[in-house]
Structure formats: structure tokens, C-alpha cells
């Protein structure tokens, strides 16, 4: 298997060589490297980059060493050994000194080997992490070797590679990886070919590919390391962008779009039925979509907007454009509860305009389905809302003009493309909506071949949600606040992270939470909602809450995407430290739907990790989904954020979208400029770029395509 990112080293027959043929590896070790690190070939190994470096460019004196330092390198002699403790606490202590002081070296394992190999009175180079116990500084299990001319001079940055526990247990540790990387580089560097044009390298001051590979593994200095990282990061992002932009250009040429420019129905809706004035951001997005729909090219647009920013009304307005030209529209949502919500919202508008609309989900009865299929095929049914039931083979449209996909990252590529195939005449226009704010760098990488529209303001009259962080010990004050809100006629959500108690996680059990709420508010009707309830029980509880029969809803995260309850103005999130930032933001978006002031209270224990403090602090500080998403990207990385870890969509080898926005910007601008001037990459100076893209085609997964 070869990775599909830009770092492909062609002369593929050489870099496709199985790792077992590298000196010192062999079949057994190769099998472990393949299973644990996905290293199958020479190409995979040379692209298995260090994730950090230990600074061995200088020696410290013992007097300088303190416990805050990550790792230190010291020269000195062992005075004597001493065995301490007994049984499982048995340890070997060596007293190590230089001219400035003394510290202890400690071994809990390999004691006999250490005593056999390491002798007092000989000068050694010691490397390890210093710790403090009382007044004593010690280094546990240090790396240790006698001082020689080589070791004394060795000022270098030592690579530290990603490893697994299983490999360490088989003695395939960092030293082993350093050795095989050195052995590979010694024979492989002459086979590395340049993948970027000379003029581009000169312009951007980038070192050569072979220099970058040499110094990413074994940098001679911090400066060489920085230059190697810059070169490899740029290349990785440049080839991703080049492919995305090329795909976009090809699609625009190849896929002709249905032309929708009749705005008569739309104008009537604006004049007679628009329920509230649109925000400037909504108007801008509608203009962008209208331009696409009348251009004759098939639209592929991503619409981003925070929870409550008014994406659904924008989708309906786009549907009117399509219906005005006698075509149909479909909206696919990931869950029944969300499909039902979209149906309820859009039916109000469709009824005003006398437009037929239906809902299709897994629970639609057979008789209703048959009737719906008939009306859809004859073209009588204009709008169909549903779950992935929409992509079943028997669902046939008369003329599908627009496919709207909500929360698209919940659907697989195959599912989305099935919806795309539902029109024989031409591919329908595609509008993908997400309430998960996507940071700019991630959007450019995941959706770089799409047009992107953003609704970045909330409808008029909406007040920002006030968010506070409270500790468990403030329970009485929180309950008093709930009482006041209920007295004012408001409703409350209380969300817990788990349904069943887990021995590992010291969390409040949902049922315990429910019982304590019922005890604290004996005169208040309380609903409960969780994922293990039957759909009809869930609907019953949600319905009671929507109608205001119950005032408090105790739930798990099933309400993250759920029904709008404008009267619910307080969201209390228990054990908030257990949730990710984007999930906290989505949950908070369940309130603030009405004109009243809404509140979100994040309740935690006093023990919080540094990362949890950043997450909670971000939530208190801002309601801006994009700011929150940027922080989330820095904390968690792109894979977790968008659920792309499993799909392999962002197996970046060296670039980091949380930190490399500037590199990505240059890479994208460079790719656009090259393709504008030389769309077929036919010029002699772009020969190396074309070769690289050709080599990628065989292995690259087309993960960016929405449809």
C-alpha cells in the first residue's frame, strides 16, 4: 500500500520495494511494521516522519539541570551503585557526577544487564528526562554510552518516531527505527527525484526533495529542520490543492447544469409570504446560488452556517428557483428526527405557496410510499424531504433539479452519489449544508473543489446566548436559577454524557440525574430522553416538551440535532469536560431559538485538564462557531473534528491544518496560478508536476468529491 498524499516518491518500482528486503528487517519484523505502523514499502518508511526531536546539540552541567526540562544530555562519571527497596519496589541507583554536582540514575528493570555493562569511574554520556524527588534530581532508565571522540562531538537533533506498545515489547523501539531509516536513506537518496519545478523552488526558497528527506529524519541543525518541514509541508498541501482545483475545473467543463432562471414563484414568495426579513449574509448566499443555477454549469456548493443562522429558509428559496422551471427538489437529512423537523419547517412555506411536499423515512408505511413514488414519478410531487430512504432504487424523480444534503459528513460518498444519479437528463445541482462550522484551512482541504458559501450572522432579534462555567459545588445556585426561569415561563434542557454507569468514568448516571432533578423539583413535570428508548417513546417525550407539558428535559446528546423548541432558554451540560468543543457548541445551539435571553451553563468537577480548561474558556468567551472550530482544530486535529479519521480523508503525513494555514494559503494560490496559466500542465517546466500527478492517480482516493 502506498499512501495517497503528495509525498510519493516515484521511480515507483524502487520505492514500492517491500520493507522486508531492507537490511535488518526481514519477514517477521516487516509483518509487525505493516500491521502496527502501516509501513509496507521503502516509500512508506522514508515518509514515516519523526513527530518530535530530542535536542542533543548541547551538553548540560548537572548544576543547570532541573525537573522542568524535557530531556538533557550530560557528561560525567558514576561514583558507585546501590541497590534499594525490595520486591516490586527494587531498584538500582547510580550516583553520577560532573565537576558541578551530583544526580542519581535509576533502573527498575534490566538491573543485571546494567551492572554487567556499566562501570564506575568511566566517563559516560547520559541522556534522559530529569525528575525531582525531594531535593534529589534523578533520571530513570537513561540512555548511556561511554564518551568517545564521536559521542563527545555529537551535537545533533535526534528523531523520535511514532511507535506502538506492541513494537516496543518486541524491541522494535526508537533506536531500531533510527537504524533502519539511516540504512534506507544511505541507499535510497539517489533514487529520489525532484517533484517541484526549479523556478518554483527558487521563488519560494525551498530546498530539494532529497535534502528535505535527509534532514527531516536527521537534521544537522534547527535551521535545516525548519527548511525540511517547510518543503515537505508545502509539497503535500500543494499536490492536494492542485488535484482539487483540477477536479473542479474538469467538473465545470464536463458536467453541464440545468438552467434555472425563472424567478416568478420566488418573487411571489418574497412579496407575499416571506415570514421575516433575510439577513445580509442570507441574501449574499442566495445571490451566489442563483448565479450558479443560471450559469449552465452544475452547482456543487457547500453552505456553512451556525445552528439557527437560517440555512433552511435559504434551501427553500433555492427550491423555489427549481420549481419555477418545472423541476423537483429533494432534501436528505441524517436522522428521522431531523428530517421530520425540516419537513415541519418547510411544509409551512410550501402550503402558503400551494406546492406539494412529502416526507419519506424508514418508518413511512408501504401504502403511503407507493402513492408517494407515483406522485414523484409523474412530477406532481415537487419537494421530497427524507433520510437515506431517498436514495433507494425505487425512489425515482420525474426531473430532479436540486439535491440538498444536510450535515453531509454523516453520509458516505457512495450514498451522496446515489442521490446525484437520480436525474437522467443532467446531474442535479447540489447544495450541501452543515451547521458544523469548518475552519477555513479544513474547508480548503476537505472541500477545495467546491464553491463555499457562509452565513455568518444570526437573524435579527436573536440575542447571543450567555454561557457560564460552574462547578458541581454550585448545585443549589443552579437549581435556584432553574426555578426562576421556569417561573418566567421558560423550559430547560439538562444534558448528561452517558446513559449507563461506567466503572472507568466517574460520571453522574443519567437516571441518577433524572431522579435528583425530580427530587429537587417535585412540582415540575420532567421529561427524559436517551438513545436506548424506542422511537415512539422518544417522540412521545419530545412532543410533550415541545407542547410545554414538561418544563425540564433530562437527556443525553440525542438532542444535539433535534426539534426546535423556541421556549427552551436554558441548556445545562453536566460533566461538560467530557464533551468536545464542537459538540458543546451544537448542544448550546438547541437554545436561543426565541427572542428571549438564553443561557448555557457548563457544569464540571474541579479536576480539569489543561485542554478542558481551554475548551470551557472558549465556550464562555465566544458564540462564534468559526472561532470555536479554529480552537477545536488546534486541540484535536482535523480527523476527529470532521469524522474523517476513519475515512482516511486527511491522512496528512506532515502538514498540520491547525498550524499550517499560511503554508496552505501559499500552496493553494500557487496551484491556482499554475492551472490558470497551464491547465493541462503541458509546459516543459511543469513536466515534474504532471509526472507526480500521474503517479498519484493510481493510488489517490477521491475523498473530496461531495457527489
Image (cartoon, rainbow, N blue to C red):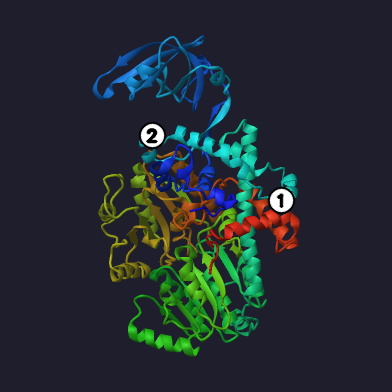
Nearest the viewer among 329 and 43 is: 43
Can residue 168 be spotted in the picture?
A: yes
Is residue 50 rendered to the left or right of residue 138?
right
Where on the picture, by quarter, is residue 690? bottom right
Q: Position of residue 185 (x, y in %)?
A: 56, 38
Q: Are marks 2 and 1 in contact (CB under 8 Å)?
A: no
For mark 2, does the 10 Å Cα neighbourhood hold few (<14), some (14 to 19), or many (20 or more) residues? few
Tell me residue 207's x, y (percent).
68, 41
Helix or strand or loop: what does disc 2 sit on?
loop
Provide the residue designation for mark 1: 197
- Number of the label disc, if any, that sits on residue 626: none
- Which residue is nearer to you in this view: 624 or 57? 57
Going by the image, does 262 lie left or right of 592? right
Pick whichever of labels 2 and 1 is earlier in the sequence: 2
Q: Give the residue at x 56% y 84%.
A: 327
Assign a secondary structure to mark 1.
loop
Q: Could you tell me residue 18's position as x and y percent?
A: 48, 48
Q: Residue at x 62, y 30 (%)?
A: 221
Residue drawn at point x = 71 percent, y = 46 percent: 201
Position of 303 compared to 639: left or right? right
- Give the Cα separation between the discs numbered 2 and 1: 42 Å
Task: Give coordinates of residue 625: x percent, y percent.
Answer: 53, 55
Q: Is residue 205 above or below residue 495?
A: above
Query: Is residue 606 visible to the viewer in this orientation of the structure?
Result: no
Q: Nearer the viewer, residue 520 or 658?
A: 658
Number of dots carrying numbers? 2
Q: Which mark is residue 171?
A: 2
- Graded by Cα atoms within 10 Å as few (under 14), some (14 to 19) or many (20 or more), the crowding at tag 1 reads some
Amino acid at each position: 500500500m502506498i499512501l495517497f498524499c503528495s509525498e510519493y516518491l516515484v521511480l515507483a518500482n524502487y520505492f514500492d520495494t517491500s520493507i522486508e528486503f531492507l537490511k535488518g528487517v526481514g519477514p517477521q519484523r516487516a509483518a509487525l511494521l505493516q500491521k502496527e505502523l502501516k509501513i509496507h514499502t521503502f516509500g512508506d518508511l522514508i515518509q514515516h516522519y519523526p513527530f518530535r526531536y530530542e535536542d542533543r546539540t548541547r551538553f548540560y552541567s548537572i548544576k543547570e539541570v532541573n525537573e522542568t526540562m524535557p530531556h538533557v544530555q550530560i557528561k560525567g562519571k558514576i561514583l558507585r551503585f546501590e541497590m534499594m527497596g525490595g520486591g516490586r519496589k527494587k531498584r538500582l541507583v547510580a550516583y553520577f557526577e560532573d565537576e558541578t554536582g551530583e544526580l542519581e540514575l535509576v533502573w527498575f528493570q534490566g538491573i543485571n544487564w546494567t551492572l554487567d555493562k556499566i562501570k564506575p569511574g568511566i566517563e559516560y554520556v547520559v541522556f534522559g528526562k530529569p525528575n525531582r524527588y525531594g531535593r534529589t534530581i534523578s533520571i530513570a532508565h537513561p540512555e548511556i554510552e561511554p564518551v568517545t571522540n564521536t559521542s563527545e562531538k555529537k551535537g545533533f537533533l535526534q528523531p523520535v518516531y511514532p511507535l506502538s506498545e506492541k513494537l516496543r515489547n518486541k524491541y522494535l523501539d526508537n533506536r531500531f527505527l533510527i537504524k533502519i531509516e539511516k540504512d534506507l536513506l544511505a541507499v535510497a537518496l539517489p533514487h529520489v527525484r525532484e517533484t517541484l519545478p526549479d523556478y518554483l523552488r527558487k521563488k519560494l526558497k525551498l530546498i530539494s526533495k532529497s535534502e528535505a528527506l535527509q534532514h527531516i529524519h536527521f537534521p544537522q541543525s534547527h535551521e535545516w529542520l525548519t527548511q525540511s518541514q517547510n518543503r515537505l509541508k508545502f509539497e503535500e498541501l500543494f499536490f492536494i490543492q492542485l488535484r482539487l482545483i483540477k477536479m473542479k475545473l474538469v467538473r465545470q467543463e464536463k458536467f453541464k447544469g440545468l438552467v434555472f432562471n425563472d424567478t416568478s414563484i420566488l418573487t411571489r414568495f418574497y412579496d407575499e409570504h416571506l415570514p421575516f426579513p433575510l439577513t445580509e449574509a442570507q441574501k449574499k448566499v442566495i445571490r451566489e446560488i442563483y448565479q450558479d443555477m443560471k450559469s449552465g454549469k452544475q452547482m456543487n456548493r457547500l453552505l456553512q452556517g451556525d445552528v439557527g443562522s437560517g440555512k433552511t429558509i435559504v434551501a427553500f428559496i433555492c427550491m423555489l428557483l427549481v420549481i419555477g422551471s418545472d423541476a423537483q427538489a429533494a432534501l436528505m437529512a441524517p436522522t428521522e428526527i431531523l428530517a421530520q423537523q425540516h419537513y415541519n419547517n418547510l411544509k409551512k412555506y410550501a402550503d402558503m405557496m400551494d406546492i406539494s411536499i412529502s416526507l419519506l423515512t424508514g418508518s413511512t408505511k408501504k401504502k403511503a410510499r407507493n402513492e408517494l413514488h407515483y406522485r414523484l414519478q409523474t412530477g406532481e410531487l415537487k419537494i421530497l424531504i427524507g433520510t437515506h430512504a431517498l436514495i433507494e432504487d425505487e425512489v425515482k424523480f420525474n426531473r430532479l433539479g436540486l439535491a440538498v444534503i444536510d450535515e453531509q459528513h454523516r453520509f458516505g460518498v457512495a450514498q451522496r452519489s446515489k442521490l446525484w444519479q437520480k436525474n437522467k437528463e443532467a446531474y442535479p445541482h447540489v447544495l450541501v449544508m452543515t451547521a458544523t462550522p469548518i475552519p477555513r484551512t479544513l474547508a480548503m482541504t476537505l472541500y477545495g473543489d467546491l464553491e463555499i458559501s457562509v452565513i455568518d450572522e444570526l437573524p435579527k432579534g436573536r440575542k447571543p446566548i450567555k454561557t457560564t462555567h460552574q462547578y458541581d459545588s454550585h448545585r443549589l445556585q443552579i437549581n435556584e436559577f432553574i426555578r426562576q426561569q421556569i417561573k418566567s415561563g421558560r423550559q430547560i434542557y439538562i444534558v448528561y454524557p452517558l446513559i449507563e454507569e461506567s466503572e472507568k468514568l466517574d460520571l453522574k448516571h443519567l437516571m441518577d440525574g433524572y431522579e435528583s432533578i425530580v427530587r429537587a423539583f417535585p412540582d415540575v413535570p420532567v421529561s427524559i430522553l436517551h438513545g436506548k428508548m424506542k422511537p415512539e417513546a422518544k417522540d412521545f417525550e419530545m412532543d410533550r416538551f415541545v407542547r410545554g407539558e414538561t418544563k425540564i428535559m433530562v437527556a443525553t446528546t440525542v438532542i444535539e440535532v433535534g426539534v426546535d423548541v423556541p421556549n427552551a432558554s436554558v441548556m445545562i451540560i453536566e460533566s461538560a469536560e467530557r464533551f468536545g468543543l464542537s459538540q458543546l457548541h451544537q448542544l448550546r445551539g438547541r437554545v436561543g431559538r426565541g427572542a428571549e435571553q438564553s443561557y448555557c451553563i457548563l457544569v464540571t468537577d474541579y479536576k480539569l485538564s489543561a485542554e478542558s480548561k481551554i475548551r470551557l474558556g472558549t465556550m464562555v468567551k465566544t458564540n462564534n462557531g468559526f472561532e470555536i472550530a479554529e480552537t477545536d482544530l488546534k486541540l484535536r486535529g482535523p480527523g476527529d473534528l470532521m469524522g474523517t479519521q476513519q475515512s482516511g480523508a486527511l491522512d496528512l503525513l506532515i502538514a498540520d491544518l491547525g498550524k499550517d494555514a499560511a503554508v496552505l494559503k501559499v500552496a493553494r494560490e500557487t496551484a491556482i496560478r499554475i492551472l490558470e496559466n497551464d491547465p493541462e500542465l503541458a509546459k516543459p517546466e511543469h513536466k515534474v508536476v504532471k509526472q507526480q500527478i500521474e503517479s498519484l492517480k493510481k493510488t489517490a482516493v477521491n475523498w473530496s468529491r461531495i457527489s
